[in-house]
Image (tube, rainbow, N blue to C red):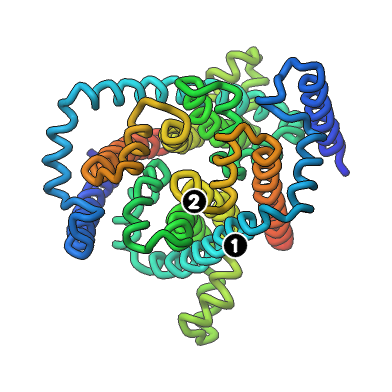
Amino acid sequence: MTKAGLIRLALIAVLLGALEVLVRIGRIDALTMQAPHKMLLDLYAMLASGKLNKAIAKTMGNAGFAFVIAVSLGVISGLMIHRMRRVRETLDPLFATYYAIPVFAFYPLLILLLGLGDAPQIFIGVMLGFVAVVVNTLNGLDRVPRVLLKTARVNGMNGLETALKITLPSAAPYILTGAKFAVAYSLIGVIGAEFIMSTGGMGYEISFAYNNFDNATMYPLIIMILVASISINMVISRWEKSLLKRRGLQ
Amino acid sequence: MSPSTRRLIVNMGWLTLVILALWQGLYALIGDIALRSPLATLQFTAKFVTTPQFATHLAETSKAFVLALSIAMASGLAIGFVLGLKRFASDIFEPFLIAIYSVPKITLYPILLLVFGLGLSAKVAFGAIHGIVPIALFTLNAVRNVKPVLLKTARVMGLSSTTTIRTVIFPSALPEIFAGLRIGFSLTLIGTLLGEMFASQRGLGFLLMNAIGLHNVDVIVMLTFLLTGFAGIAGIVLLLINRRITAQA
């Protein structure tokens, strides 16, 4: 491990230790923040008892589904939009401002359209993640070296073959950047929708626990979501870096 | 007006037309139960924006947003500059920033509520945490990527470190810093609104949340229209400024 990595670990340890001490001596009251060791014990108890497994499976399943749709739809749309200059130029201003749009405002409409099941939540997750994937795919496609495309033409590849064998692999690191955003956005979409209106899932359980001062449920759930999103992100980052390294780009 | 600016505005026009057509089509499909037609929305908006109720909520949201954006900009730029200039410090702290950037911050709102209580400070904090990290990360990269030859020139000319930052690093990093500010603007806006939806009794976000609860379609559609319109126009203006700065640099 590098020196910076060691210092980083030490910093995290110091911060957690400080939080533990501050809660123990009562500088931060237990209704606001739990001691870190207590959060871990609560997390273990929660998972062992299995009472929230359904909520966890629902949220993670929906977010995973939204992620898969956002990435596949995003890559395909990216490939298509890249070939249509006019369409791309028209959509550019939308892409540039998309993330300031309060997508959750569309939730009531989606409930009416898709019913009160999981579908509207997944839809919100897809709406948020999709554009990040499209934008990054386009960015990656812009950077495919000309010579590769010429080689494809010389070898008589058709459009599909070129996409699968040349453009997509070449744009892969940028698509992975989009996928990282899609991880966070599909979780944000699903959990945010559950906060607003739903009858189950981690977001629902978190706000239920918050309203009942049930920190023993709230903090473990929050920690699970944070740990899940950070670790998925780190895995994708590793992959992205190794791709770039193989090309001598980093 | 440069040709690229004109093209952007023409494209905006087309985009607006397409969106209006889609909206009208969707309305024909769904009807009044969950949507209003563009025309009805405009009429309702024109009426609603003159009410004192709207003015109070708008003032509340503007105040929260301006505060959140100032905090996000000040701390984001400061963090970005310090880490961008110190290689070792950025090796330590950059992964933290990236981790925070990738976290679904919406899950943190109950913690912020417990720490700050229900009200202005909670939603300002919620808006600011959305904006700080992208501004810091963009600034960091911009400062770090300043061409070494410029820095060497500054050293050769014997510029002091503050003069170097002011006259060399800042101008050459400005286009990328501004791109970060643009993204920070969008995310702070959405963060403030989300904060109001979940953690407030005032502001446009609260109004929206309230309308969702009461199923007041007029208000839902109007607020979606107003907020999207504002975000869109502000985003385009910032994009135009960004392009101008990039073209000059």
- Seen at 77% across and 22% down, the residue is A23
- Seen at 47% across and 59% down, the residue is A126
Where in the figure is residue B216, as x and y percent of width and height?
Answer: 26, 43
Image mark 1: chain:
A
The image shows residue A87, relative to residue A109, as above or below, that is below
Query: Which residue position is annotated with label 2?
Result: A189
User: In terms of secondary structure, where does tag 2 sit?
Assistant: helix
Quadrant including the N terminus of chain B: top left
- Seen at 65% across and 30% down, the residue is B84
Image mark 2: chain:
A
Where in the figure is residue B193, as x and y percent of width and height?
Answer: 41, 34
Left or right: B180 in relation to B29: right
Q: What amino acid type should be assigned to the residue bearing mark 1? A: Gly
Q: How many marks?
A: 2
User: In terms of secondary structure, where does tag 1 sit?
Assistant: helix
Labels 2, 1: one chain? yes
Where in the figure is residue B53, as x and y percent of width and height?
Answer: 23, 24
Query: Which residue position is annotated with label 1?
Result: A61
The image shows residue B28, relative to residue B57, as above or below, that is below
Q: What amino acid type should be assigned to the residue bearing mark 2? A: Gly
Left or right: A224 in relation to A124: right
Q: Name the foreground residue: A244 vs A153.
A: A244
**Mark 2 or mark 1: whose residue is earlier in sequence:** 1
Q: Residues within 10 Å of mark 1 (few under 14, many from 20)?
A: some
- Seen at 35% across and 52% down, the residue is A92
Alpha-carbon distance for marks 2 and 1?
13 Å
Image quadrant where residue B5 sits: top left
